Image (spheres, rainbow, N blue to C red):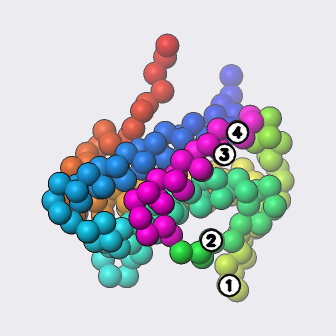
Amino acid sequence: MPVSLHAAIIPSYLQILGSVSGFIAKAQAHCAEQGVDAATLIDARLVDDMLPFGYQVKSTVVHSLGAFEGVRKGLFAPDMTPWPQTFAGLQAAIAQAAAALQEISPEEVESFIGQPMAFAFRDSRMEFTAEEFLLSFSQPNFYFHAATAYDILRMKGVAVGKRDFIGRVRLIG
């Protein structure tokens, strides 16, 4: 039996959003235990020309729930609004995205297949089918930003490991 588009995307987004929520909780605990200001981690970057932890977390929302919102409209443009500046705000964004993703039905996702979809940013525009946008653009971006958020915390000494990134796997039974 072939895997549905819904099954190929939504459960994995939920799995990793749960992981990102766990990163945020560990970052918050780290700050409390070490006497570190939360802004130190929320504003932390791997290198100067990359955006900070808060942006990386926000981008997991943008490339999961935001991707589906874009597919519904037929157009996705990057969300340029500021990211939350507190751990509570980051957690709330993740929780809201996860709750909304859980409400997207398999039937709705399957209905997207073959629909035209565009990504637009400044003077650039890329045309996709909805499924190719989700699978070849937003899904890789989603994982990139989740991994970058994880990497920033590792670099800053927060006790996160591979199991924290992988999160809750979907076992039989």
In the foreground, 124 or 109: 109
Q: Is residue 12 left or right of residue 107?
A: left
Q: Amino acid at mark 2?
A: Asp
The residue indicated by pointer 3 is 100
Mark 3 and mark 1: Cα distance apart in space? 28 Å
The residue indicated by pointer 1 is 122
Q: Secondary structure at mark 3?
A: helix
Q: Secondary structure at mark 4?
A: loop
Tell me if label 4 and label 3 are in contact, CB under 8 Å: yes
Q: Quadrant of residue 2?
A: top right
In the rendering, at what x and y percent does residue 72 appear?
Answer: 80, 55
Mark earlier in primary sequence (1, 2)? 2
What residue lies at 32% left-to-right and 82% top-to-bottom?
48
Q: Amino acid at mark 1?
A: Arg
- In front: label 1 or label 2: 2
Q: Secondary structure at mark 1?
A: loop
Mark 1 and mark 2: Cα distance apart in space? 12 Å
In the rendering, at what x and y percent does residue 34 appear?
Answer: 15, 59
Q: Amino acid at mark 3?
A: Ala
Q: Amino acid at mark 4?
A: Glu
Tell me if label 4 and label 1 are in contact, CB under 8 Å: no
Q: Quadrant of residue 102?
A: top right
Mark 4 and mark 3: Cα distance apart in space? 5 Å
What residue lies at 84% left-to-right and 53% top-to-bottom?
115
The residue indicated by pointer 4 is 103
User: What number is the disc on residue 79?
Assistant: 2
